[in-house]
Image (cartoon, rainbow, N blue to C red):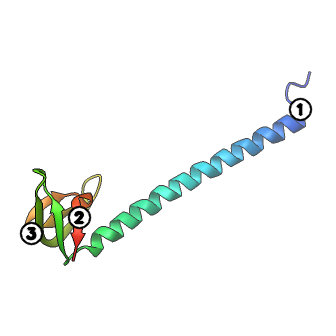
Amino acid sequence: MNPVNDQEFMGQMAAFSTLEQVTNLAASSDQMTATVATDQSIALIGHQVTYTNAEGEAVEGEVENVDFSGESATLTIGGETGIVPGAVTQVR
């Protein structure tokens, strides 16, 4: 007549609470990662960098702009737009 006793119920509630907190922690971690990536991209403005272009060549230039209009930030380096920050290989 008692399909779930008090101990089982409390155990399930504790498990759900733990799952909720882990989910919240993951969301906070994602937000923090995005914020750090934004800050790092902004910090590149005005610096001379070397990046690898689509042809695999090393190109040097000054970071002029950071664009946040898409899903991820892109840089404008020496007049060339749409460069992902991960393509930067050296900062001076």
Q: Name the spot of residue 41 as percent of width and height, x first.
A: 29, 68
**Alpha carbon distance from label 1 to label 3:** 69 Å
Residue lying at 29% horizontally and 52% vertically, measured from the top left: 71
* The one of 7 and 40 positioned closer to us in this rendering: 40
Badge number at residue 63: none
Residue at the image position 15 percent from the left and 65 percent from the top: 76
| Residue 89, placed above or below residue 2 | below
Circle 3 — which element? loop
- Counting residues from the start of the chain, the first of labels 2 and 3 encountered is 3
- Give the amino acid at mark 2: Thr
Q: Residues within 10 Å of mark 2 (few under 14, many from 20)?
A: few
Depicted 38 relative to depicted 53: above or below = below
- Percent x, y for residue 83? 18, 58
Q: Residue at x 39, y 60 (%)?
A: 34
Return the residue found at the far top.
Answer: 1
Q: Nearer the viewer, residue 52 or 10?
A: 52
Which residue, given by chain and number where applicable, does mark 2 sit on?
Answer: 89
Percent of width and height locating residue 31: 45, 59
Which quarter of the figure has residue 62? bottom left
Q: Earlier in the sequence, mark 1 or mark 3?
A: 1
Q: Amino acid at mark 3?
A: Gly
Secondary structure category for the residue under label 1? loop
Amino acid type, residue under disc 1 in the picture: Asn
Which residue: 54% across, 52% down? 26
